[in-house]
Amino acid sequence: MTTTHVAQFSVPFTRHLESDGTAVGALPPFAGNPVDLVPLYRGMVLARIFDAKAVALQRTGRLGTFASSLGQEAVGVGAASAMAADDVLVPSFRDQAAQLWRGVTPVELLLYWGGDERGSDFAGPREDFPISVPVASHVPHAAGIALALKLRQQARGVLCIVGDGATSKGDFYEALNLAGVWRLPLVVLVNNNQWAISVPRSAQSAAATLAQKAIAAGIPGEQVDGNDVIAVRERVALALERARSGGGASLIEALTYRLADHTTADDARRYRDDAEVSTHWHGEPVARLRAYLVSRKAWSRDDEERALADAAAEIDRAAETYLATPPQPVWAMFDHLFAALPAALASQRAQAIAGGTGDA
Amino acid sequence: MPDATLVEAINFALARAMQDDQRVLILGEDVGKDGGVFRATDGLLARFGPARVLDTPLAEVAIAGVCVGLAAQGFRPVAEIQFMGFAYATIDQLLNHAARLRSRTRGRLTCPMVLRTPCGAGIHAPEHHSESGEACFTNIPGLRVVIPSSPQRGYGLLLAAIRDPDPVVFLEPTRLYRATREPIMDDGTALPLDRCFTLREGNDVTLVGWGGVTREMLSAAERLAAEGTEAEVIDVATLVPLDAETILASVAKTGRCVICHEAPLTGGFGAEIAAQLAGPGLLSMLAPVERVTGYDTIVPLSRLERHYLPSADRILAAVRRTLSHG
Ligand SMILES: Cc1ncc(C[n+]2csc(CCOP(=O)(O)OP(=O)(O)O)c2C)c(N)n1
Ligand SMILES: [Mg+2]
């Protein structure tokens, strides 16, 4: 008998900023001048303030169930800032940080979470997909979009964001596998925030890393510090460049932590200790980049105050617009169902307009 | 007799079934420590331990498929799918495997599993959390489909579903979960899985429906009573197998029928009942059958949701139309 090792794999991990904001080694070129990082910082602050507002609106009965991205802002901002405008984002339900960066407006996001479908009709990134609530079911869509771009020989890439829980689903594996064999211009980014509602990462998969799920699909897989916006941006940018230039698909696992409840409908104290959450406030992405910027004299207390005030003002204005937006007319539920309303549905539409009590 | 809501009654039934029968297992997403997102499995992990209450990875197809294997091995798995919008993925397992294992093996292997899932609109839930997809399951031969509309019926029907030797899809209307509280008998008594429940008797018109909309049927019946019209209200809590007999007997008495469900009209399970009325029931009918249902649209997000849901007003209008015939 002979036994040889026919294949060996490793999973790299990248971090540029330590949890206290200290830079490790040379930063990537886009981060060479700390001032150039300020937009990333502002993007994360905007997402955080948006989240806080959305939660407050929900708590006062003015928004539906909402999933905060508290603590994971670097995943969204880092990834979205690595995208070209004509790349396509295929997001999950916790990706408002990425969506805001891509030009989805806070008003649109609030409309959606407030129960108004118009919130998914983005004026900005017209090809970006609406968020996917059914976990992982959008990864195959992202592969399909990537196939379309490839068939048209366009140098564009697709970024799909999923959670750690999503990596347990068949549709995730199926899409990854297909993207591997077809060398699709796809980057799947896992926001590993350590929890899928009450199920911790350790109960989600026996795999040492989620990034290694790439290996079975024959594509590169790597980990990145998901609380380090510089590292996220760098690694996603490299993967997208590879995708656009014919190098195929990649999987990136961003290690971060869900500092908030799963959603406003959840009470995380039922299943995890406050102490665990407290330890993860250390190293959270906003404070981490701020510490770096301050250490490089690129950010002052005044800058901070102004940035917070600007973001708060923008989000407050958005909330006012949202709250002042009248609901759609009843017939909206019919009028977007098909390109043209089938004659067979006309009587139902009329009935709905009549309060449902007219003749069908 | 404890007072219980529907979701608490479900919890009592699960606990009772687990206590009575070591083969009963609970599995699903967040069913353990969290007690399920609606708390239907609250306390069961603490009481019965992690070998009998299993938090699964996030994978609906695996949850349903694992139940098939467990059931074939003699366990009585009760799976929870978090919302009906995520139960559609299990249809492959239910249709191709669970519902036909007995028949394929001519009874050598069987599949006594229960797949529970919340359903329906009316709680301002996010997208994909308000579906009424019962008709997707009622067209699967070999599968029972049950949908309770009160705490006691939830309790008794769930116990029956768990004890049944064949697969059951058990749908729980979310807007009824905490809508009412009633004293329930937690004595292990199951209810039949093939009988409609007559919630109110009357001679003038028959209202037939199930799930969330039974509330609107009852409130319509009350308003009709105030006008001197007595409606018989029938809860078809067990859609498959359908107890057509009870419905036909009622219509033989009233001659008029309004079928109500929250799911879309076309291809809805109400069409099956209408077909019964057009067949064996035809000669009792004094007026055309009316259906009051969700529209053939996607359930709107919360801002328009109430315009989609069948209301008592819509039911009343339909009743008046049937009464206007001779
Ligand atoms: C297919 C499917 N099953 C169940 C749910 C209910 N659900 C919503 S979020 C969630 C957990 C998701 O965890 P993860 O993928 O880690 O993403 P996170 O919420 O942590 O961002 C579950 C079970 C769903 N939306 N879709
Ligand atoms: Mg997660």
Image: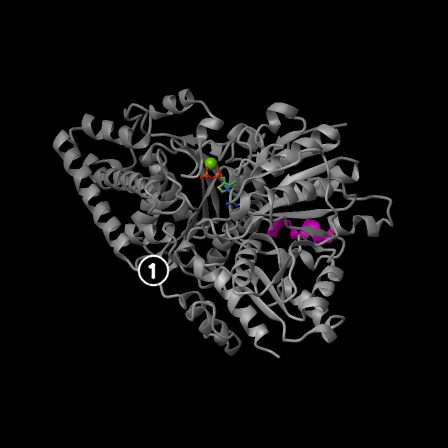
- Image quadrant in which you'd find residue B28: top right
The magenta stretch is B88-97
Q: Report whether A227 appears left or right of A248.
A: left
Residue drawn at (44%, 50%) of the image: B124
Drawn side of residue B304 relative to residue A30, left or right: right
Q: Residue at x 79, y 40 (%)?
A: B72
Q: Residues within 10 Å of mark 1 (few under 14, many from 20)?
A: some
Secondary structure category for the residue under label 1? loop
Give the image location of residue B270, x and y in percent: 64, 64
| Chain letter of the residue carrying label 1 | A
Q: Position of residue A242 (x, y in %)?
A: 42, 47
Q: Nearer the viewer, residue A270 or B59?
A: A270
Residue B285 vs residue B53, the one in the foreground: B285
Q: Position of residue B227 (x, y in %)?
A: 52, 65
- Residue B62 is at least partly visible in this image: no
- Residue identifier under label 1: A327
